[in-house]
């Protein structure tokens, strides 16, 4: 039981007469997060529609914030699609200006870190899709600038490698 199991936790705000595999982002309760320099609000479309192996979120990055720390994945493939606003994608040692309609793929195991940053005065919304570690997939996440890493095994057990 966890975030991506819709039985114990369905983020929908109200009952819907449509099939449970259909959800509108406006019907989903948002989750906000904030740490120094990092902040966002996410709508968990995967949980709302019952995905089991695929994480699907819409994340809004406020002005002046980053969506996460600079990181890479060993086994988690990710795909991003800019829905609204503009942001910068930091990809390895390069930066790219992104706008609505831009799509980004991050194949697993490249060792190339990524991070979204919003230096603009308006929020940026990005759809984020990824194979879920712990759902039959192992993954190691590396945060080189923090000197931290952890591994999640196929059953969802986490082990810190570096603090």
Image (cartoon, rainbow, N blue to C red):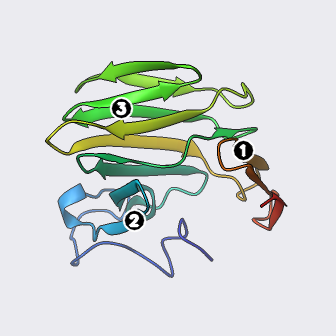
Discs 3, 1 touching: Cβ within 8 Å: no
Among the two numbered marks 3 and 2 on one chain, the one whose residue lies closer to the N terminus = 2
Is 69 left, or right, of 73 in this rendering?
A: left
Please state, as top left, top right, bottom left or bottom right, where the N terminus lies in the image.
bottom right
In the displayed image of the protein, which residue is found farthest to the bottom?
8
Packing grade of label 3 (10 A; few <14, some 14-19, many >=20) is some
Please state, as top left, top right, bottom left or bottom right, where the C terminus lies in the image.
bottom right
Residue bearing the label numbered 3: 81
3D distance between C-alphas at marks 3 and 1:
23 Å
Residue drawn at x 74%, y 49% is: 147
Is 76 left, or right, of 49 in this rendering?
A: right
- Determine which of the numbered discs, if any, sits on residue 142 in the image: 1
Please tell me whether residue 130 is drawn above or below residue 79 in the rendered image: below
Residue toward you, 104 or 24: 104
Q: Nearer the viewer, mark 3 or mark 2?
A: 2
x and y, in percent, of residue 150 in the image: 77, 56
Element type at mark 3: strand
3D distance between C-alphas at marks 3 and 2:
22 Å
Among the two numbered marks 3 and 1 on one chain, the one whose residue lies closer to the N terminus = 3
x and y, in percent, of residue 12 in the image: 29, 72
Residue toward you, 101 or 37: 37
Residue toward you, 33 or 1: 33
Residue bearing the label numbered 2: 34
């Amino acid at each position: 039981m966890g975030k991506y199991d819709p039985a114990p936790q369905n983020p929908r705000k109200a009952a819907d007469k449509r099939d449970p595999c259909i959800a509108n982002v406006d019907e989903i309760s948002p989750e906000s997060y904030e740490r120094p320099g990092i902040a966002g609000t996410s709508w968990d479309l995967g949980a709302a529609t019952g995905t089991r192996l695929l994480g699907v979120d819409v994340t809004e990055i406020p002005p002046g914030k980053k969506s996460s720390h600079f990181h890479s994945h060993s086994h988690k493939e990710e795909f991003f699609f800019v829905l609204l606003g503009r942001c910068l994608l930091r990809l390895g040692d390069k930066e790219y200006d992104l706008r609505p309609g831009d799509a980004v793929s991050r194949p697993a195991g490249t060792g190339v870190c990524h991070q979204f940053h919003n230096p603009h005065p308006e929020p940026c919304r990005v759809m984020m899709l990824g194979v879920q570690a712990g759902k039959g997939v192992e993954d190691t996440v590396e945060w080189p600038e923090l000197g931290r890493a952890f591994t999640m095994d196929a059953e969802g057990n986490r082990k810190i490698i570096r603090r």
